[in-house]
Amino acid sequence: PHNSTGENGFCFTQTLNFSHPPPPPGEAGRTFDTPSEQEPCSTLLSNGTAFSSTPSPSDSCAEPLCSTTPGEEETQLNEGIKFVSTEGEELACGWGAFTPGCLQLFNTSKGVLFFLCVASFLQGMTVNGFINTVITSIERRFDLHSYQSGLIASSYDIAACVCLTFVSYFGGNGHKPRWLGWGVLVMGLGSLLFALPHFTTGRYEARSAAEVGICGGNQSLPCAHAASSLSSYRFVFMLGQFLHGMGATPLYTLGVTYLDENVKTNYSPVYIAVFYTAAILGPAAGYLVGGMFLNIYTEIGREIDIAPENTLWVGAWWIGFLGAGAASLLISIPILGYPQRLPGSQRYIVMRVSEAHQLKDGSHKKASDPDFGKTVKDLPRSVLLLLKNPTFIFLCLAGATEATLIAGMSTFGPKFLESQFSLSASEAATFFGYLVVPAGGGGTFLGGFLVNKFKLRCSGIIKLCLLCTVSSLLAIFIFFIHCPNMPMAGVTQMYEGSALPGGHLNLTAACNTRCGCLQEIYSPVCGSDDIMYYSPCHAGCKEVSENLRNGKKVYHECSCVKKTLLPGPGDAEAGKCTSSCAKKPLLLFFMFVVILFTFLSSIPALTATLRCVPDRQRSFALGIQWIVVRTLGGIPGPIAFGSMIDKSCLLWQDQCGEQGSCYIYQNSAMSRYTLIAGLVYKVLGTTFFIVACLLYKPPPPESAPGSSGASENGNCDLQEHKPSLPAEEDI
């Protein structure tokens, strides 16, 4: 009898094996697999070692399969056969000897995917969401400069770069779920440490600023105070971020390869796409939830008479880190319980078709050795093998250019929207979140879906990446257009309405000379004449009340604001004037397209990286790629974009004689610099993908295991040519 358990099992055979012609198609449904549906059948040897017995014309089928002794097994392996050791391997889900039956329900690829998605969601929410949202509150609370908060943000990438080689090399050849679980646990500890300064410092005392800012009010500011000792807490934040970086390192290297090894080759891009989509939805949730927490005063339960719009307000920045830290500690427990290899995954490894780039000297075959990569002495050889692979190198460089754009866009995208459409910081962040979630999340998932749908091989995947990069390159030309700046007295125009020479500020005029306004207090107001003013004081306002309809402060008796019909001083409302830019829908649509196509190529590029290197080097290759992407893209990206955008600044903050951050940007210059940066990086990315595609050398069809026959379920869908060979059945 033919003892096959179908797709989900192995063929358990006796010692004798007979060859016979393929059965008629009519009988195939009853007893045998048809030649087009045959799967490479694993023969279970006496010591628990699984061999692939893929049919081949040169097979000598009359010889017994189990005649080899355990010592001879490895020597008899030939190039077309995969060796999977399962000897003494524990495949049950649990912790040590505690492996209850109810847990085995989660011991599947979908179970792993769920827990890894939760972990990547938490990582994205904490590092790319909460940190970016609360950084200004932390600066205000702990008296930090922008460069110090920049160091806090960079600590994550520095930690990741330091740990990547070590984690991806040893973790790739070790017990991946344990590395992943401990990593998530360390990440949770980092979040808890990040929230610690709130509990170890004294109460935050904000000055009541009801009268500060109007004409004739108390305009004194404590400039002479010594540097606060609170700024030393930046080292605690840096350590917290360092732990975040260490903990997240296994997630995007070992997590990806663990998923890839335990599912079919054609399902792998979809699983990885779902994993990365969760990582992209995390920051969006971080922006929204973090923004909600910032509307709560940092000292919970204390009454305060200042509103969240006030520059002295500090929100409850620490709540998110406590919640994310506790959730990370909890989610690490199930991840630590997973086995080194999921039950049934051996057949995917046995049937996997190698698409590794073929090196001229044949040195790529060294990586097929089961003992390769288990010791430190193989590390230099592993690096050399990857450096010899031009497809891998150019995919890394292309990834770095895309990462530069993504890092720059995520950091300064809200600032771009804020300036172009005259929005508040919170409105711009929400707007950008609505843009990124469908474009970034949808693009990431769609990229994995397209690779799976069209059964793309490695060269086809690189061509898809190229198509996406060219599409986003064309869409970037939208930055030729921009919205005009809202008129601002003393900055973009003079108080009388005439144009102000570029680079010159003149915030004092006859209407506000007696007010004694300070440039340190920036609190923009919108006059009833639709002109913005630097502050209520600079608008010459003498009285303040509250608009009951929207809760905003309204200033009266503003001597610089002209009433439209009647003579006399006008009114002004707190906040910027709303922009009525006709190009807004067009700009938003094309920004959506740029983000969509940039993220659309991310999963295909990752899949191509996994396919163009030998199986045993996958984790290490991802680690090296992450180092290249971070050092050439993630770390310098925001710095490059930031310095270019700073060139378009019209009005700088004045902190007691020192230059602070930029208040107002010139929209035309900002669009122009964004266009230049985008074009440079997109052209580089396109070039790198073209070179990677041209230099890729796939293995010859006859050397690929499993190329004899492929089925929809048989995991050999990547082979385009399927030569018909004599079928072999086990009796």
Image: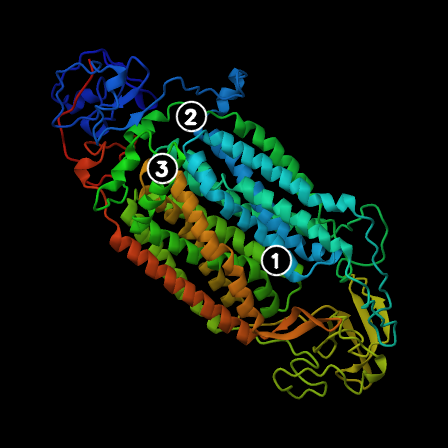
From this view, report whether residue 468 is shown above or below residue 71.
below
The residue sitting at 33% across, 20% down in the picture is 9
Along the line of sight, the residue nearer the viewer: 114 or 237: 237
- Callout 3 crowding tier (Cα within 10 Å): few <14, some 14–19, many ≥20: some
* Label 1 packing within 10 angstroms: few (<14), some (14-19), many (20+): few
Residue type at the position of mark 2: Leu
Q: Amino acid at mark 1?
A: Gly
Where, by quadrant of the figure, is residue 402 drawn? Answer: bottom left
Q: Position of residue 361 (x, y in %)?
A: 21, 44
Q: Which tag is nearer the camera, tag 2 or tag 1? A: 1
Most foreground residue, 294 or 478: 294
Examine the rendering and report whether any part of residue 365 can be seen: yes
Please name whichever residue, 12 or 368, is drawn nearer the observer in this view of the structure.
368
Residue 387: % across, % down: 33, 49
Looking at the picture, which amino acid does disc 3 mark?
Asp
Residue 267 in view here: no
Q: Earlier in the sequence, mark 2 or mark 1?
A: 1
Nearest-to-viewer mark from 3 and 1 = 3
- Residue at left offset 42%, top offset 25%: 342
Spatial CA distance of label 2 from label 1 is 41 Å
Residue 150 — which label? 1
Circle 2 sits on which residue?
Answer: 342
Quarter of the figure with the C terminus: top left
Q: How is the image coloured?
A: rainbow
* CA distance for labels 3 and 1: 37 Å
Q: Secondary structure at mark 1?
A: helix
Identify the residue at image location x=70%, y=82%. 490
Give the residue number, with chain letter if any, for mark 3. Answer: 378
Secondary-structure class at tag 2:
loop
